[in-house]
Image (cartoon, rainbow, N blue to C red):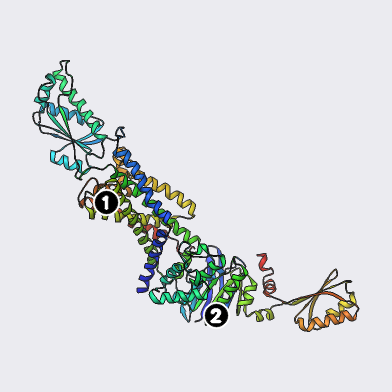
C-alpha cells in the first residue's frame, strides 16, 4: 500500500514539477487569463456596451397602488414583447434581482395614479416615485426597462387625460442598484469567464500531454511499473486539478489585488465551485486523451469544443443576452454552472447555498467525463 | 531469477504477431532476441514486460505467472524502452527520483540507488542537467539507468543502442556486461547482428512471429548450413584441373570462380586455407590477394529465412 502511495505521489509531483519548471509557460498560463479578463472587464464594466437584450427581459412588478391606472400599466407591461413580467412583493423583487433571477423590478408606490394624473396636468405638482430595482452588472438593462416603463405609463395615462400639453413623464424614477457586495466590480464576471476558459485550455494540454506520452514511449514505461489503472489515471486527475487550482488562485489573487474584485459571497462556496471546476477541467483533459488519436487532430477538436463550451457558458457574453431557448439549452453546459457559480460567490454576494447547485452539477459532469475516459481509454497502445 | 516465455501467442485482428514463442532467460546471461523489424520482437517484449496480455501461453518469473497492471511480480522486471522515454524538462536526478518513486523508493534508499546507477552509467557529473542538454548516447544511458533503480533481477532492453555513436554504444555494452556479471537475466532485442554476437550468450532468432532458432552463437553456426569463406585473387584465373582438385579437398564445401576471383567455402578455414593455397601454388598459380571471412549470424539468418536482415 505504501508503495502505491509513493508511486501516486511521484506521478503527481512529476506533473506539477514539469508545470512549474517551464517558467515562461507558467507565466503565460496565468497572465493570459488576467490580461484577457481585464480587457473584457473593462468593456463590460466600463462605458455601456449598449445594444438590446435579445431575449425577453424578466422583470418583476410590485403594485402598491392597485389603482385602475397602475393595473392598466401593469397589464400593458405584461403584453410588451420585450418583457417577461411577474407580480411579486417588493421584498421578493429585491431577492430575485439580487439572485440574478430578475434583471430588474418596478415598484409602483401607493398614490401612483392620483399623483401621476396630477403631474400630467400640472408639472409643478408632486410626482410619484416609481422604484426601478436593477442588477448593476447589467447596466444596459436599466435604460431599456426605464424607457419601456415610460412608454407604457404615458400610453395609459394619456388616454383619458390627454390635453395636448403634457411635457414630461408624470413621475420620477428612482433607480436603485441592488447589490449585496460592498460594491459592484465590472471585472468580476470577466475574470470568472476567462479563468474558466484558460483553465479548460490547460485541461486540454494535460490531455494532449498524455497522448504525447504514448507517442514517446513514456506511457509504456509507466505501465511496466506495478501500477494499477486507478493510480495511473487518478494521479493524472489529481495533478491537473492541483494545477488548475493554482491557476485559479493566482488569477483571482490578481483580480482581487489589482482589479478590486471581491468574494462578496461565501468564501467556502467560492472554494467549492473553484475546486469542482478544477476537477472538471482535469477530467475533461482525461476524456480528451481517451478519445483522441493523434495529437494535432485532438488539440484542434478540443480547442473548438472548449471555445464552444465557454461561449455557451456565458464566459464571453453574459448568458442573459442569449435567446431564451439558448438560455435553457446552456443549463446543460457545465461551464454555464461554473460561470454562474463564480459570479454568485463574487459580485452577486450570494450565500453558501447558492454554490451547492453549481458544485453538484460540476462534480456530476466530472464523474461523467471520468467514466467516459475510463471506458474509452486504450490501455495497451503505446 | 529465470524468465520463461512459454508458448506465447498474440493476434491483432486477423494478424498473428507472435505465434508459439518459447525461450528462457537465465541469471548471468544475455539472451539476444534477433529479428528484422516487424518480426514480433516488440510484441514479445510487451508480453514479457506485462504490458500486453498474451492470447495464449504465459510468462513466468521463477515459476510465478506474470500479470498486467499492478501485479507485484513486475517489480522483478526492468524495461528499457526502444524510445528514449525521459522527462526532458527535468534534470537527470529528478528523472531518476521519479522512476524510483514509481517502484515505491524514497528517502535514503532512493538516493543511494540514484548514486549507484549514475555511477554505473557514467552520468554522475551530469545529474543536474536535463536530458535535453545530453548527447544521444548520454540520453540512452540515462534511459537505461531509469530502469535499474529498483534493482530488477530481469532486464528487458528493447533496441537500446538505436541512434548512438560507436563510443556510446561501447559504453552501453560495458554497462550491460556489468549487469549480466551481477547475475541478472537480460533479454536484449536488436536487429544488429554485431551486437548480438558480442553480447549474447544465447540467441533466439525470430521472424514472422515465430522462433526459428534458439542456441548459442557457436551452436547456431554449427547447426546451420553456413560456411566460412576464403576469397583469392589471381592474375590469371585457375584452370579447370586446379579447380577440380580444390573442390575435392577435404573440408571444402563449395567453390565459385568469377573472373580472376576464386571463392572457397569451408567448414574450417584454418585447415582448408593452407591446402588450397599449396595446391594452387603447385599448379603455378600465384595468389595476389587473399581475404577470409568467418560465417556469422547474418549467414545463419540468411540460411534460416532466405533473406538478409538488411533486406527487411
Question: x, y (%) of residue B147?
Answer: 48, 72
Q: Say if residue A365 shows up in the picture.
A: no
Question: x, y (%) of residue B117?
Answer: 49, 75
The residue tagged with tag 1: helix, strand or loop? helix
Of residues A290 and B149, the one drawn nearer to the viewer in this rendering:
B149
In this view, the residue farthest toward the right is: B284
Of residues B118 and A69, the one drawn nearer to the viewer in this rendering:
B118
- Residue at figure coordinates x 27%, y 49% from the top left: A341
The image quadrant that residue A156 belongs to is top left
Mark 1 or 2: the one toward you:
2
Q: Quadrant of the N terminus of chain A?
A: bottom left
Q: Is residue A377 left or right of residue B214?
A: left
Q: Say if residue B269 shows up in the picture.
A: yes
Check the image and report above or below for B253 versus A315. Answer: below
The residue tagged with tag 2: helix, strand or loop? helix
The image quadrant that residue A65 belongs to is top left
Check the image and report above or below for B23 versus A166. Answer: below
Check the image and report above or below for A273 versus B55. Answer: above
**Chain at tag 2:** B
Residue A358, disc: 1
Question: x, y (%) of residue A196?
Answer: 34, 49
**Chain at tag 1:** A
Q: Which residue is mark 2?
A: B180
Q: How packed is label 2: few (under 14 Cα within 10 Å), some, or many (20 or more)?
A: many
Q: Is residue A91 left or right of residue B152?
A: left
In this view, the residue farthest toward the front is: B125
Q: Is residue B194 left or right of residue A101?
A: right
The image quadrant that residue B275 belongs to is bottom right
Give the Cα separation between the discs numbered 1 and 2.
60 Å
Of residues B134 and A242, the one drawn nearer to the viewer in this rendering:
B134
Residue B83, disc: none
Count the labels in the image. 2
Amino acid at each position: 500500500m505504501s508503495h502505491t502511495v509513493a508511486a501516486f505521489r511521484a506521478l503527481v509531483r512529476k506533473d506539477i514539477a514539469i508545470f512549474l519548471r517551464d517558467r515562461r509557460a507558467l507565466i503565460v498560463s496565468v497572465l493570459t487569463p488576467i490580461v484577457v479578463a481585464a480587457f473584457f472587464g473593462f468593456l463590460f464594466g466600463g462605458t455601456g456596451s449598449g445594444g438590446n437584450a435579445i431575449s425577453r427581459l424578466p422583470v418583476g412588478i410590485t403594485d402598491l397602488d392597485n389603482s385602475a391606472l397602475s393595473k392598466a400599466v401593469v397589464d400593458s407591461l405584461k403584453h410588451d414583447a420585450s418583457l417577461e413580467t411577474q407580480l411579486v412583493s417588493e421584498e421578493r423583487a429585491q431577492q430575485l434581482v439580487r439572485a440574478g433571477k430578475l434583471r430588474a423590478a418596478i415598484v409602483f408606490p401607493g398614490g401612483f395614479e392620483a399623483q401621476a394624473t396630477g403631474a400630467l396636468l400640472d408639472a409643478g405638482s408632486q410626482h410619484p416615485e416609481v422604484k426601478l430595482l436593477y442588477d448593476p452588472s447589467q447596466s444596459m438593462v436599466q435604460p431599456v426597462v426605464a424607457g419601456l416603463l415610460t412608454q407604457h405609463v404615458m400610453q395609459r395615462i394619456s388616454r383619458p387625460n390627454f390635453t395636448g400639453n403634457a411635457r414630461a413623464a408624470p413621475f420620477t424614477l428612482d433607480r436603485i442598484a441592488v447589490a449585496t457586495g460592498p460594491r459592484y466590480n465590472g471585472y468580476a464576471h470577466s475574470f470568472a469567464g476567462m479563468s474558466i476558459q484558460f483553465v479548460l485550455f490547460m485541461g486540454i494540454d494535460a490531455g494532449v500531454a498524455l497522448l504525447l506520452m504514448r507517442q514517446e514511449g513514456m506511457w509504456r514505461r509507466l505501465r511496466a511499473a506495478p501500477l494499477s489503472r486507478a493510480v495511473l489515471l487518478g494521479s493524472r486527475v489529481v495533478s491537473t486539478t492541483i494545477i488548475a487550482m493554482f491557476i485559479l488562485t493566482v488569477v483571482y489573487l490578481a483580480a482581487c489585488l489589482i482589479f478590486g474584485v471581491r468574494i462578496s459571497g461565501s468564501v467556502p462556496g467560492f472554494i467549492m465551485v473553484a475546486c469542482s471546476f478544477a476537477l472538471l477541467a482535469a477530467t475533461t483533459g482525461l476524456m480528451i486523451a481517451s478519445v483522441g488519436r493523434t495529437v494535432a487532430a485532438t488539440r484542434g477538436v478540443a480547442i473548438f469544443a472548449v471555445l464552444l463550451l465557454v461561449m455557451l457558458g456565458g464566459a464571453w457574453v453574459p448568458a442573459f443576452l442569449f435567446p431564451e431557448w439558448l438560455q435553457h439549452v446552456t443549463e446543460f453546459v457545465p461551464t454555464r454552472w461554473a460561470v454562474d457559480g463564480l459570479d454568485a460567490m463574487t459580485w452577486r454576494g450570494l450565500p453558501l447555498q447558492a454554490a451547492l447547485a453549481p458544485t453538484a452539477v460540476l462534480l456530476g459532469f466530472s464523474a461523467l467525463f471520468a467514466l467516459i475516459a475510463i471506458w474509452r481509454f486504450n490501455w495497451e497502445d503505446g | 531469477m529465470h524468465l520463461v516465455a512459454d508458448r506465447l501467442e498474440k493476434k491483432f485482428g486477423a494478424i498473428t504477431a507472435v505465434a508459439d514463442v518459447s525461450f528462457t532467460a537465465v541469471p548471468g546471461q544475455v539472451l539476444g532476441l534477433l529479428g528484422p523489424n516487424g518480426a514480433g520482437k516488440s510484441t514479445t517484449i510487451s508480453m514479457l514486460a506485462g504490458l500486453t496480455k498474451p492470447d495464449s501461453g504465459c510468462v513466468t518469473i521463477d515459476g510465478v505467472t506474470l500479470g498486467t497492471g499492478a501485479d507485484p511480480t513486475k517489480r522483478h522486471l526492468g524495461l528499457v524502452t526502444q524510445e528514449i522515454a525521459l522527462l526532458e524538462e527535468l534534470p537527470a536526478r529528478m528523472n531518476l527520483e521519479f522512476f524510483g518513486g514509481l517502484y515505491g523508493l524514497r528517502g535514503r534508499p532512493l538516493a543511494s540507488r540514484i548514486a549507484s546507477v549514475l555511477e554505473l552509467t557514467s552520468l554522475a557529473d551530469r545529474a543536474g542537467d536535463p536530458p535535453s542538454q545530453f548527447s544521444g548516447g548520454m540520453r540512452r544511458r540515462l534511459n537505461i539507468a531509469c530502469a535499474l533503480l529498483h534493482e530488477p533481477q530481469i532486464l528487458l532492453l528493447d533496441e537500446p543502442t538505436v541512434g548512438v555513436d560507436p563510443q556510446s554504444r561501447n559504453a552501453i555494452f560495458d554497462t550491460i556486461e556489468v549487469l549480466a556479471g551481477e547475475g541478472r537475466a537480460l533479454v536484449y532485442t536488436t536487429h544488429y547482428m554485431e551486437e548480438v554476437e558480442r553480447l549474447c550468450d544465447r540467441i533466439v532468432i525470430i521472424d514472422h512471429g515465430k522462433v526459428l532458432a534458439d542456441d548459442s552463437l557457436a551452436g547456431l553456426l554449427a547447426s546451420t548450413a553456413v560456411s566460412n569463406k576464403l576469397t583469392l585473387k589471381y592474375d590469371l584465373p585457375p584452370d579447370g584441373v586446379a579447380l577440380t582438385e580444390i573442390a575435392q579437398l577435404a573440408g571444402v564445401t563449395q567453390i565459385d570462380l568469377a573472373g580472376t576471383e576464386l571463392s572457397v567455402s569451408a567448414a574450417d578455414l584454418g585447415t582448408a586455407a593452407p591446402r588450397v593455397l599449396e595446391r594452387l601454388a603447385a599448379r603455378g598459380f600465384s595468389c595476389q590477394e587473399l581475404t577470409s571471412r568467418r560465417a556469422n549470424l547474418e549467414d545463419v539468418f540468411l540460411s534460416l529465412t532466405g533473406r538478409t536482415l538488411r533486406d527487411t
